[in-house]
Image (cartoon, rainbow, N blue to C red):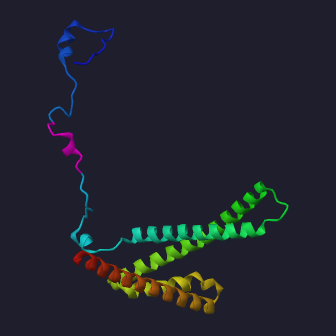
């Protein structure tokens, strides 16, 4: 029973209400705590069609390629800035000035290249997801066409010739990457089967 303070205008007729108890919503719940919070370990899908498709959604795709592009570009840019900062140091510089020059060059190059690579990843993810939606198929053609379109769209402001060259480079790069992934997948699975048989 909980303590309830009496008001100054308390009536003696209200004494039968003092025997009240507070409501506890968990008192009749006789389930062990381990089963209360037993969460599934496999993904849950709202529709059966979602569980059949073995690919990322467009939002996951967008986040993945943009993040990987930005992170990879930032690391490469920081490395480039490190080399530029070391080359730009002069003989009379103090250590503090050299470190400052390296940090400034690394930050500038990392930010610039990271942003460019992130935009390319964003364009590619949007193009690939759009191709999957339009064609209703998930194959290498979507990836190559998305690479072509991404390169062309990224360099569209530089003119049609630059856009065509960038599109060709993007399509070839994506085609090689997807083909290499398929070859490595097949190679790794053959090695796994051989190790398992031994």
Q: Residue at x 64, y 89 (%)?
A: 159
**Residue 148 appearing in the image:** no
Identity of the residue furthest to the top in this view: 12
Tell me, yes or no, if residue 140 can be seen here: yes
Spot occupied by residue 191 in the image (x, y as percentages of width and height): 31, 79
Residue 154 locus on image (x, y percent): 57, 81
Q: Which residues are magenta?
A: 29-38
How far from the left and from the top, in percent, is residue 57?
Answer: 36, 71
Q: Is residue 104 above or below residue 178?
A: above
* Quadrant of the frame with the C terminus: bottom left
Query: Vertically, is 46 above or below 32?
Result: below
Q: Residue at x 58, y 67 (%)?
A: 75
Residue at 19% across, 9% down? 13
> Within the image, what quadrant is residue 184 found in?
bottom left
Q: Is residue 122 left or right of residue 165?
A: left
Would residue 9 be counted in the magenta stretch? no
Residue 36 magenta: yes
Q: Quadrant of residue 46?
A: bottom left
Residue at image coords 39%, 88%? 141
């Amino acid at each position: 029973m909980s303590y309830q303070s009496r008001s100054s205008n308390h009536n003696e007729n209200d004494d039968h209400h003092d025997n009240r108890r507070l409501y506890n919503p968990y008192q009749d719940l006789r389930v062990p705590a381990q089963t209360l919070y037993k969460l599934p370990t496999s993904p849950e899908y709202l529709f059966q069609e979602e569980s059949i498709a073995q690919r990322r959604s467009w939002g996951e795709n967008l986040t993945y390629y943009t993040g990987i592009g930005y992170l990879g570009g930032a690391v490469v840019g920081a490395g480039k800035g490190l080399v530029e900062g070391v080359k730009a140091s002069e003989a009379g510089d103090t250590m503090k000035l050299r470190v400052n020059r390296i940090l400034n060059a690394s930050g500038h190059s990392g930010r610039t290249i990271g942003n460019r690579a992130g935009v390319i990843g964003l364009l590619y993810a949007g193009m690939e997801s759009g191709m999957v939606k339009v064609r209703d198929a998930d194959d290498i053609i979507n990836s190559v066409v998305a690479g072509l379109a991404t390169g062309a769209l990224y360099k569209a402001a530089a003119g049609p010739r630059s856009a065509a060259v960038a599109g060709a480079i993007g399509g070839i790069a994506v085609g090689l990457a997807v083909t290499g992934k398929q070859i490595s997948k097949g190679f790794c699975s053959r090695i796994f089967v051989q190790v398992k048989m031994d």
